[in-house]
Each structure stands twice: as C-alpha cells, then as structure tokens.
Amino acid sequence: MFLVSVAPTLADSTTIFTFDDVSPVQFVQIQNGYGGLDWQNFFIQNAANTPPFDTGMVSSPNVAFNGLGDPASISSGNTFTLQSAYLTAAYVNVEQIRVQGFTQGIQTYDNTYTINDNSPTLVNFNYVGVDQVSFTALDLFSSDIFAMDNMVIAVPEPNPRALMLLCTALGMFVVLGRKAGIGERA
C-alpha cells in the first residue's frame, strides 16, 4: 500500500488599507471589524489640509493615527501577514516606532523603525503568520503620535485546486485502506 501526502498551498488575499472609505468630519475611532481586523486605539483623520497629518498622507484624504500617542494594535482571530505601511511622525521631526508581531501571544517579531515628519516612510515589515501587531511610538520628549497610510495586509486563503487534491488523496487512502482491511475490527 502507498500513502499520498498533499499539502494545500496558500494564496494570499491582499488588502490595502487607505482609510479613505471613511468620511470623518475631523477624526473617528476605527471600529473592530473594519477590514476584518480588530483595532485598538487607532483613529482615522481627515488629513487633507490638516497639519501635521497632511504630510503623512499617501492616498487622499485620510490617514490612521494612534490616539493620544498611546500604543495601538491590530489583531485577528486568523493569522495574516503585515506586509508594509507608510509611517510619518506627526508632531516631532524624528520618531522611532517599535512594531511587534505576535502569534498566539508569543512574540515573533520585534523591530524599531525611524520615521520623520518630512514625508511618509515606506516600511516593509513582512511579518508573516501573525495574529496581532502592536505599534508603540518611542519619542520620550514630545508627542508620540504617528500617521499611517496605505497599510498592506495579506490573509492566507486556501487554494481550491490544492484542497481538491487533498480531498482526493484522502478519499483514495480511505478506499485503499478498506480494500486492504485496515481499520477493520476482528
């Protein structure tokens, strides 16, 4: 008898969070469920003609920001990949942002990125297989607020063809096992 092993491959469903599908008069807190994620202490700001947030704008008119300069996070019941985002310091010239990725409560990524207030900085995170990412501004002398725009998240999706092959292989295993008498009781 032989055993066929087929592992389903995953394709990624990629989402770019431009935050431009919300129409705040000034700013509004991001609610859980937005884009399929849970959000803690992130707000959407209308950045058009709103210094200092206008500098962080990649796509018009909105950006996200961390409320009151406190740590902020995104999470999901499923794993995802935080691919990239544009980050900009809001009220200081240069700021450091500590970004930590977690999988089932275990820290899997921990990096610090330096950003400025002149223009958005593209940060390629590539935090693969995380279910939570926290953002903490490390400026100790002034405002810890940063703007974020065009965040790219990829969520693994099963490849239907690979799943079909897996089901076929499992079906063949069951049929061949029955023919060989595997699993029969005496």
Image: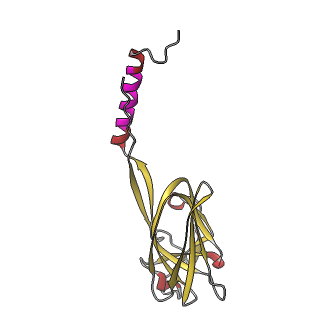
Name the spot of residue 107 as percent of width and height, x first. 60, 61
Relative to 93, is 74 above or below? above
Answer above or below: position of 48 versus 161: below
Left or right: residue 142 versus residue 36 is right
Which of the two residues, 67 or 185, is positioned nearer the viewer here?
Answer: 185
Q: Is residue 157 visible?
A: yes
- 148 or 54: which is nearer to us? 148
Q: Residue furthest front?
A: 1
Q: Residue 51, how many percent across, how many down?
A: 53, 88
Looking at the image, how many numbered discs can be counted on the residues?
0
Residue nearer the viewer, 37 or 130: 130
Name the residue rendered at 47%, 86% in the picture. Answer: 55
Question: Residue at 66% across / 85% down in the picture?
Answer: 140
Q: Position of residue 70 (x, y in %)?
A: 65, 75
In the image: residue 138, left or right of residue 159: right
Rendered location of residue 102, percent (x, y):
58, 60
Q: Is residue 48 visible?
A: no
Q: Which residues are magenta?
A: 164-176
Picture quadrant of residue 120 = bottom left
Q: How is the image coloured?
A: secondary structure
For the N terminus, the quadrant is top left
Choose top left, top right, bottom left or bottom right for residue 138.
Answer: bottom right
Q: Residue at x 60, y 54 (%)?
A: 104
Type of secondary structure dominating the magenta stretch:
helix
- In reply to whether residue 173 is colored magenta, the answer given is yes
- Please, is residue 43 above or below residue 132 in the view? below
